[in-house]
Amino acid sequence: MKILVPVDGSPYTKRMLAYLAAHDEWLGSQHQYTVITVVPAVPPRAAAVLDKAMLKSHYEDEAEKVFKPIRTFFNRQKIPAEFLAKVGPAADQITAQAKKGGYDLLIMGSHGHGTLGNLVLGSVATKVMAGCEVPVLLVR
């Protein structure tokens, strides 16, 4: 099974990884994992005055902060995974990757704000589920 795993480095990402580790059916060579993180874009006016190499380095550094413990998890589980960093609105980038990557499943952690919280705050998980044709497994 080809699985997309969006991560943001939050405690909810850690819960989702703990869920994977606790369920043997999700681990093993029969699955192909792609881990994605989305770094918020620097505002256009600020980006316009920054050196392109500096901006690229910023995005790579921010993504690596999230990826470092996730790489450790996958290495300990002896599971190969591809790591992919994107820039922009998180829900849009995750949904686009899910569509173009031909994934069978998307597994992600969710803050679980509830209906009122989603109405007021919005939710990446809610937006991903609304825009994604791939089945989504949310771990709270």
Image (cartoon, helix red, strand yellow):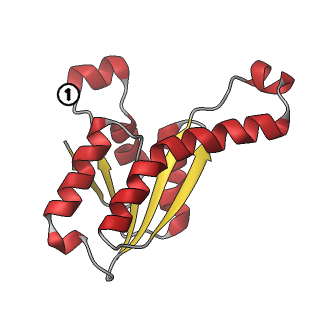
On the image, the x and y values in percent for residue 60 come to 64, 44
On the image, the x and y values in percent for residue 58 come to 67, 36
Q: Residue at x 60, y 47 (%)?
A: 86
Frontmost residue, 88 versus 12: 12
On the image, the x and y values in percent for residue 103 come to 43, 68
Q: Quadrant of the C terminus?
A: top left
Q: Residue at x 34, y 36 (%)?
A: 10
Residue bearing mark 1: 114
The local secondary structure at tag 1 comes to helix
Residue 59, by quadrant, is: top right
Figure check: 42 above or below 35? above
Figure check: 125 above or below 84? above
What type is the residue that disc 1 sits on?
Answer: Gly
Frontmost residue, 115 versus 67: 67
Q: Residue at x 52, y 67 (%)?
A: 101
Q: Is residue 93 left or right of residue 124?
A: right
Q: Residue at x 14, y 61 (%)?
A: 22
Q: Is residue 32 left or right of residue 94?
A: left
